[in-house]
Amino acid sequence: MTHINDAEIAYGLKLRAEEAAKTPERSLLERVIPLRKTILELRDKGHATSQIKKWLGEQHLHIAEGTLRNYIARIVSAERRARDEGIQETSNADILRICKGIVRAKIAPPNSNELCADHLTSPLAPRQNAPMPAKKTPPSPSSSTFTPRPDNEL
């Protein structure tokens, strides 16, 4: 069994840290967005999410099916929003910016019980008081289900 000393471990960790600094970690969404056109074409041709997931796995991009469905919905929504903003050709950076904006828009501010005006689609209905339920009378204390039977005693 070979013995590895602390200096070798420290050197190996230093090399890994330097390499990690050279290639910044990208989120899974950032890695899916460049493939969005192919993913959407496959989906439009009738391929199931499980098949698209398998194809992404072949591209060394491992993703859960539910996450893929979520990302597809977010990308489609982002492209729709880009068209609404007047952006004809959306870049990957545009889609990522809009996707992040979509997520941030859904997060409520901390300690806030009120909705932002942007999120309200219709005015709130006036609050109506519900009718009070009828009061129930408690059972009388003498009502018992035990009936003594002296002939059954031992």
Image (cartoon, rainbow, N blue to C red):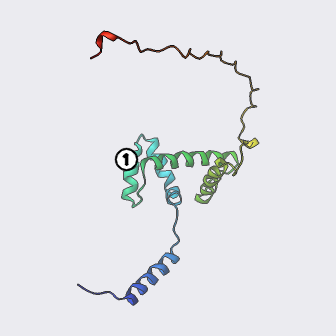
Q: Quadrant of residue 133?
A: top right
Image location (x, y in percent) of residue 149: 35, 11
For the point 37% across and 47% down, the residue is 51
Which corner quadrant holds the N terminus? Answer: bottom left
Q: Nearer the viewer, residue 13 or 147?
A: 147
Image location (x, y in percent) of residue 59: 39, 59
Report the residue marked by disc 1: 51
Image location (x, y in percent) of residue 78: 61, 48
Residue 68 against residue 139 in the figure, above or below: below
Image location (x, y in percent) of residue 100: 62, 55
Q: Amino acid at mark 1?
A: Gln
Q: How many marks on residues?
A: 1
Which secondary structure, mark 1? helix
Q: Nearer the viewer, residue 43 or 112?
A: 112
Residue 120 left/right relative to 44:
right
Estimate how packed mark 1 is, as few (under 14), some (14 to 19) or many (20 or more) residues with alpha carbons within 10 Å: some
